[in-house]
Image (cartoon, helix red, strand yellow):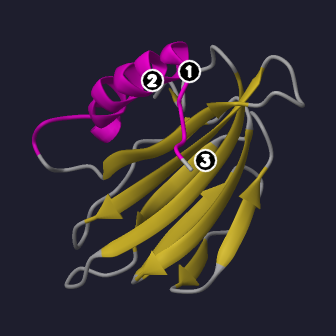
C-alpha cells in the first residue's frame, strides 16, 4: 500500500521545515533548537492544525519568554527542564513527565535544568492554521 500526500501538504511541510529552524531564536547557540517533526491540517476541526516539534536544550540553554496561541502538550524525552507559566511557580519536569499549557498563557521560564547534561522535549500544539508556533513576549 502506498501513501500519497496531497501536493499542498507537501509544500506546507517543506515551508515548515525551512521556517521552524529559525525558531531557535538566534544563531549564537544561546537558545534551544526547535526541530519540526509533523504539521497537519485537521480535517475534523476546520481551521486548525496539529504541529509536533522536538525542542533540544544544550546544558544551560534557555528559551525566550513566549506564548503559544493554541494549546500545548509537552513531554520530556531526555534530561530535565524548568518551566514556569504566568501565575504559577516554576516546576522541574524530568524524563517521562508531561504538562499542558492553555492557549495564550505566557511561558515565562523554559530552560534546561542542568548545566552539564542536555534536555529534550516532544511538543504537540493545536493551533489556528495560520498561527505561528510561538510568539515572543515583549520584554
- In the picture shown, does residue 126 fall above or below 136? below
Hey, which quadrant is residue 96 in on the image? bottom right
- Secondary structure at badge 1 equals loop
- Residue closer to the observer: 76 or 28: 76
**Is 96 placed left or right of 121 in the picture?**
right
Q: Are marks 2 and 3 in contact (CB under 8 Å)?
A: no
- The residue labelled by disc 3 is 107
- The residue labelled by disc 2 is 10
Q: Position of residue 40 (x, y in %)?
A: 63, 33
Range of the magenta residues? 2-28
**Is 130 placed left or right of 19 in the picture?**
right
- Residue closer to the observer: 47 or 85: 47
- The residue labelled by disc 1 is 6
Hey, which quadrant is residue 125 in on the image? top right
- In the picture shown, does residue 58 fall above or below 126? below
Q: Position of residue 23 (x, y in %)?
A: 35, 34
Q: Position of residue 122 (x, y in %)?
A: 52, 63
Please name which of the two marks, 1 or 3, marks the residue nearer to the observer: 1
Disc 1 from disc 2: Cα separation: 6 Å
- Secondary structure at badge 3 equals strand
Circle 3 packing at 10 Å, graded few (<14), some (14-19), many (20+), is many
Q: Are marks 1 and 2 in contact (CB under 8 Å)?
A: yes
Disc 1 from disc 3: Cα separation: 35 Å
Sequence-first tag of 2 and 3: 2
Amino acid at each position: 500500500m502506498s501513501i500519497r500526500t496531497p501536493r499542498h501538504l507537501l509544500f506546507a511541510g517543506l515551508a515548515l521545515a525551512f521556517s521552524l529552524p529559525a525558531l531557535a531564536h538566534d544563531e549564537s547557540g544561546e537558545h534551544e533548537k526547535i526541530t519540526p517533526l509533523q504539521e497537519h491540517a485537521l480535517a475534523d476541526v476546520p481551521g486548525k492544525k496539529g504541529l509536533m516539534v522536538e525542542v533540544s536544550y544544550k546544558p544551560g540553554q534557555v528559551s525566550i519568554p513566549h506564548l503559544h496561541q493554541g494549546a500545548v502538550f509537552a513531554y520530556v524525552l531526555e534530561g530535565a527542564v524548568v518551566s514556569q507559566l504566568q501565575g504559577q511557580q516554576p516546576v522541574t519536569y524530568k524524563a517521562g513527565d508531561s504538562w499542558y499549557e492553555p492557549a495564550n498563557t505566557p511561558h515565562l521560564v523554559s530552560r534546561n535544568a542542568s548545566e552539564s547534561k542536555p534536555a529534550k522535549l516532544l511538543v504537540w500544539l493545536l493551533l489556528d492554521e495560520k498561527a505561528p508556533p510561538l510568539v515572543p513576549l515583549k520584554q
